[in-house]
Image: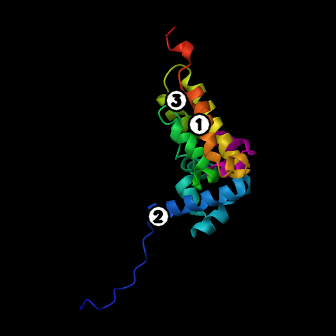
Amino acid sequence: MSQDTPSIDRPRRRNSTATRAAILQAARETFTQRGYDGAGLREIAQTASVDTRLISRYFGSKEGLFAEVVDLAYEKSMMMTPEHNADAARYLLTGTEKDPADGLLLTLRSAANPRAATIMRESIERNYQHRLAEALPGPDAAGRSALLIAICAGVMLNRQLLGHTELNSADVERLIPYLHAALDAVADVPAENTGTD
């Protein structure tokens, strides 16, 4: 048999990793555009070019799929510790990446559903807040990490989604030292807890 002879067509085996990734990508786009309540499994399956039953096979349910999408959307979290806050402030005021804005849209469009809100809160607390708290010096790290995340989300909401004029001005870099100071005020150990007089 020569090398030029075409091979016999065999049914293609499904690549489960690629299928799972396609479903996650389609779900992320759909949940971001329509929120938890507006996103349907049929639409997600159609966008991913898969049978709807595969979503149940890989993720169990719409909730399970949403939970994985949320973990991915919140995965790129910045460290807002004293040694990183200058970079964090600069990124929050001048960054142009699309992913953080998409994560915020996913959050806002899904938050009205109590179960979706619980999934998102648990993801933030289990992943981002936990990592940040472990990296912060001093007492009450969990509470301070929650405050830092709230500051971050507020700046992103006003700048990227609402298009706040001052936060999108040509000279926005002048505000970086103020935001840096605000982040440090929460991330640094307060003077009364340092043990110095």
Label 2 sits on a secondary structure element that is helix
Between the residue at mark 3 and the residue at mark 1, the CA separation in whole angstroms equals 23 Å
Q: Residue at x 66, y 56 (%)?
A: 31
* Residue 4: percent from left, percent from top: 29, 91
For badge 1, the amino acid type reads Pro
Q: Quadrant of the N terminus?
A: bottom left
Q: Residue at x 52, y 46 (%)?
A: 75
Label 1 sits on a secondary structure element that is helix
Asked if residue 104 can be seen in this view, the reply is yes
- Start and end of the magenta stretch? 103-122
The residue at which mark 1 appears reads as 177
Q: Which mark is residue 133?
A: 3
For badge 3, the amino acid type reads Ala
Give the left or right position of residue 194, taking residue 155 as reference.
Answer: left
Magenta highlight: main SS:
helix
Between the residue at mark 3 and the residue at mark 2, the CA separation in whole angstroms equals 35 Å
Label 3 sits on a secondary structure element that is helix
Extreme residue toward the top, this view: 197
Of 164 and 148, the residue lying toward us: 164
Extreme residue toward the right, this view: 112
* Residue 159: percent from left, percent from top: 68, 48
Asked if residue 64 can be seen in this view, the reply is no
Between the residue at mark 2 and the residue at mark 1, the CA separation in whole angstroms equals 44 Å
Of 91 and 153, the residue lying toward us: 91
The crowd level at tag 2 (other Cα within 10 Å; few <14, some 14-19, many 20+) is few
The residue at which mark 2 appears reads as 18
Q: Earlier in the sequence, mark 2 or mark 1?
A: 2
Of marks 2 and 1, the one in the foreground: 1
Colour scheme of the rendered structure: rainbow
